[in-house]
Amino acid sequence: MNPFYRRIYRVVRHIPKHRVATYGVVARLAGRPGAARTVGWALSALPDDTDVPWWRVVNAAGRISLSSHNHSDVVQRALLLREGVRFAPGGAIALSEFGWPSGAYEAAPAAQTRAASLRRSRRLKGLRT
């Protein structure tokens, strides 16, 4: 097994019930900042009988990223609800309340605002040329 995958699984096993972590935070805690997609690949490679609580990993917006074609998104949502994680009406989880580790999400809104601003600037620049 890939040693990085093993580190990812170790981190995910430490996410407590009632909490979630983002793919990016898991990657950072596993020793590879910026490897969020690899976290997704590692979790998708888990066997069905795993003890790794994969459902506790969500995207940076606090949303479930799994596909609905095989209903894995419904399963993930149900498992999180059973653990007491609440979803906002739009489907997001408040990372400030449910994110693990707690301090990792305090600056998330500012980072998301900066990222959105950068994307908007790039779009506008493309329109101006």
Image (cartoon, rainbow, N blue to C red):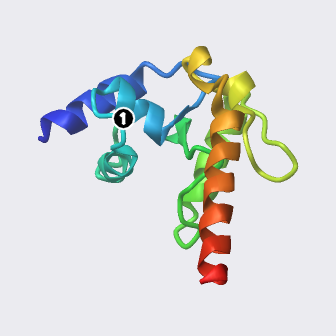
What residue occupies the far front of the structure in this picture?
129
**Residue 98 seen in the current view:** yes
> What residue is at 22 percent from the left and 32 percent from the top?
6
Q: Quadrant of residue 111?
A: top right
Front position in the image: 106 or 75? 106
Q: Position of residue 86 (x, y in %)?
A: 78, 35
Q: Secondary structure at mark 1?
A: helix
Instruction: Give the residue at x 45% y 38%.
Output: 24
Q: Position of residue 125 (x, y in %)?
A: 62, 72
Compared to residue 40, the image places residue 119 above or below, namely below
Q: Amino acid at mark 1?
A: Ala
Image x and y of residue 23, in percent: 46, 41
Q: Is residue 115 left or right of residue 51?
A: right
Indicate the quadrant where residue 30 lies. Answer: top left
Determine the residue positioned at 71% across, 36% down. Answer: 109
Q: Identify which residue is drawn at 52% across, 68% down.
A: 70
Viewer-side residue, 14 vs 60: 60
Most foreground residue, 121 or 74: 121
Image quadrant holding the N terminus, namely top left
Residue 61 visible in the shown view: no
- Which residue matches tag 1? 27
